[in-house]
Amino acid sequence: TPTTVNQLCDAVLSANGQSRATYPVSYAAAQLGDLRTSSADITRARELLGWEPKISLQDGMRRTVEWAMTAIK
């Protein structure tokens, strides 16, 4: 299923132990040329490679933050 920008934002904040209460999201009017929607289609990866995602967005974000915090020490 497609992931919205709001869901991505929530995943990033959650992985950092934050929420929109701490970091509210602000919205601006669409600009000329902005895409209304955009999403990846992994059908070909499934068909040609038998690939399936194994990690949820939330887990991936959490792991990325953990790695980054270790890497910058």
Image (cartoon, rainbow, N blue to C red):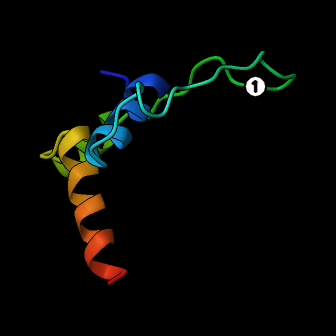
Check the picture and name the quadrant holding the C terminus.
bottom left
In front here: 72 or 47? 72
**Residue 57 placement: quadrant:** top left
Q: Is residue 21 visible?
A: yes
Check the image and name the residue furthest to the right.
Answer: 32
**Residue 36 placement: quadrant:** top right
In the image, is residue 59 above or below residue 1?
Answer: below
Percent of width and height locating residue 70: 25, 77
Within-10-Å neighbours for mark 1: few <14, some 14–19, many 20+: few
Check the image and name the residue furthest to the bottom.
Answer: 73
Identify the residue position indicated by label 1 in the image.
34
Q: Amino acid at mark 1?
A: Asp
Give me the residue at 12% from left, 46% from top. Answer: 54
Q: Secondary structure at mark 1?
A: loop
In the image, is residue 68 above or below residue 44?
Answer: below
Percent of width and height locating residue 38: 55, 27
Check the picture and name the quadrant holding the N terminus.
top left
Looking at the rendered structure, the number of numbered marks drawn on it comes to: 1
Give me the residue at 35% from left, 31% from top. Answer: 19
In front here: 30 or 72? 72
Check the image and name the residue furthest to the front.
Answer: 22
Q: Is residue 4 visible?
A: no
Percent of width and height locating residue 71: 31, 80
Percent of width and height locating residue 5: 49, 27
From the viewer's perspective, tell me whether residue 38 is left or right of residue 72: right
**Residue 63 placement: quadrant:** bottom left
